[in-house]
């Protein structure tokens, strides 16, 4: 296992708000349900969630190595002790503002007026093994590398949020509305539609993030640590795991 570890986890949640006033819209190709027609596009706002980096200094090398169990470094080595661990929790929350009208011969047509999406990294930590804390060189070297990983996340997220804003705005340029027996049923359908679409976005963002993080792999990262902090420093910590 490499000395420097990464992981990402996802959370997903949403909310909907509906009032019964407005006309009805068409629905994008990715939506499913009985649709209505005839009103302007839905507005979309995608906001970036970018949590600050927190530090956890309580875990041991053994605990961090177990957390990252099964991961291999860029040379396929699975036997190295983990001196640090980068954890990022990524999530989405969304709200829908909608209106509607009664339709003949019964039921309602509920139209989405606006969608507000908060997308990104909700929590992240750099975990440093407590055995390295007294060695200022090793501690600072490892912490700086994990901070660079957080910086990579920042860049990927900011770019992706801009692209997601553009994509959703285009997809909803024809509007989004659902016909159902009640407004509650229509809103449940709309919620499922939006959740499914945002889950696609989460998966796409995760793939881009993993690609960017993988590009940081350094076949010489352990030797770089020894060049910075002295010969043998790696092996001393590996014996501690």
Image: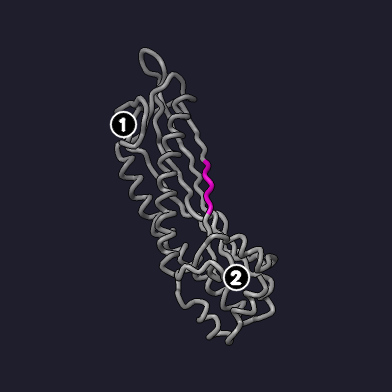
Residue at 45 percent across and 75 percent down: it is 219
Residue at 43 percent across and 39 percent down: it is 196
| Disc 2 target residue | 81
* Residue with the most extreme top position: 105
Q: From the viewer's perspective, is residue 122 above or below residue 33?
A: below
Q: Position of residue 24 (x, y in %)?
A: 35, 28
> Going by the image, does 153 lie left or right of 84?
left
**Label disc, if present, on residue 72 of the rendered structure:** none
Element under disc 2:
loop
Q: Position of residue 19 (x, y in %)?
A: 47, 29
Number of dots carrying numbers = 2
Q: Few, some or many C-alpha atoms within 10 Å of disc 2 (few <14, some 14-19, many ≥20)?
A: many
Q: Few, some or many C-alpha atoms within 10 Å of disc 1 (few <14, some 14-19, many ≥20)?
A: many
- First-in-chain label (1 vs 2): 1
Residue at 40 percent across and 57 percent down: it is 208
Element under disc 1:
loop
**Label disc, if present, on residue 26 of the rendered structure:** 1
Q: Quadrant of the N terminus?
A: bottom right
* Residue 46 vs residue 88, the one in the foreground: 88
Please provide the residue range marked out in magenta.
9-13
Contact check, label 1 and label 2, Cβ < 8 Å: no
Q: Position of residue 124 (x, y in %)?
A: 57, 59
Mark toward the viewer: 1 or 2: 2
> Going by the image, does 21 lie left or right of 144?
left
Which image quarter: residue 139? Answer: bottom right
Give the distance between the C-alpha atoms of the residues marked 1 and 2, in whole angstroms: 56 Å
Which image quarter: residue 83? Answer: bottom right
Q: From the viewer's perspective, is residue 102 above or below residue 125?
A: above
Q: From the viewer's perspective, is residue 84 above or below residue 236?
A: above
Q: Give the main secondary structure, helix, strand or loop, of the magenta stretch.
A: strand
Q: Position of residue 81 (x, y in %)?
A: 60, 70
């Amino acid at each position: 296992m490499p000395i420097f570890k990464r992981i990402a986890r996802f959370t997903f949640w949403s909310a909907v708000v509906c009032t019964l006033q407005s006309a009805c819209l068409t629905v994008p190709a990715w939506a499913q349900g009985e649709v209505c027609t005839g009103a302007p596009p839905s507005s979309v706002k995608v906001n970036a969630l970018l949590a600050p980096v927190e530090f956890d200094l309580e875990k041991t090398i053994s605990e961090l190595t177990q957390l990252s169990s099964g991961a291999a470094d860029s040379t396929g080595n699975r036997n190295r002790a983990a001196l640090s661990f980068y954890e990022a929790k990524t999530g989405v929350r969304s709200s829908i503002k909608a209106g509607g009208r009664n339709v003949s011969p019964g039921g309602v047509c509920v139209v989405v007026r606006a969608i507000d999406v908060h997308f990104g990294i909700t929590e992240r930590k750099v975990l440093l093994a407590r055995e390295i804390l007294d060695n200022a060189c090793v501690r600072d070297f490892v912490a700086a590398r994990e901070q660079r990983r957080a910086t990579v996340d920042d860049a990927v997220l900011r770019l992706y949020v801009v692209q997601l804003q553009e994509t959703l705005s285009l997809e909803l340029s024809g509007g989004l509305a659902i016909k159902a027996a009640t407004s509650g049923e229509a809103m449940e359908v709309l919620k499922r539609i939006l959740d499914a679409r945002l889950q696609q976005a989460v998966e796409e963002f995760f793939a881009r993030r993993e690609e960017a993080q993988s590009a940081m792999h350094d076949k010489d990262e352990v030797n770089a640590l020894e060049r910075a902090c002295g010969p043998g420093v790696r092996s001393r910590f590996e014996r501690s795991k």
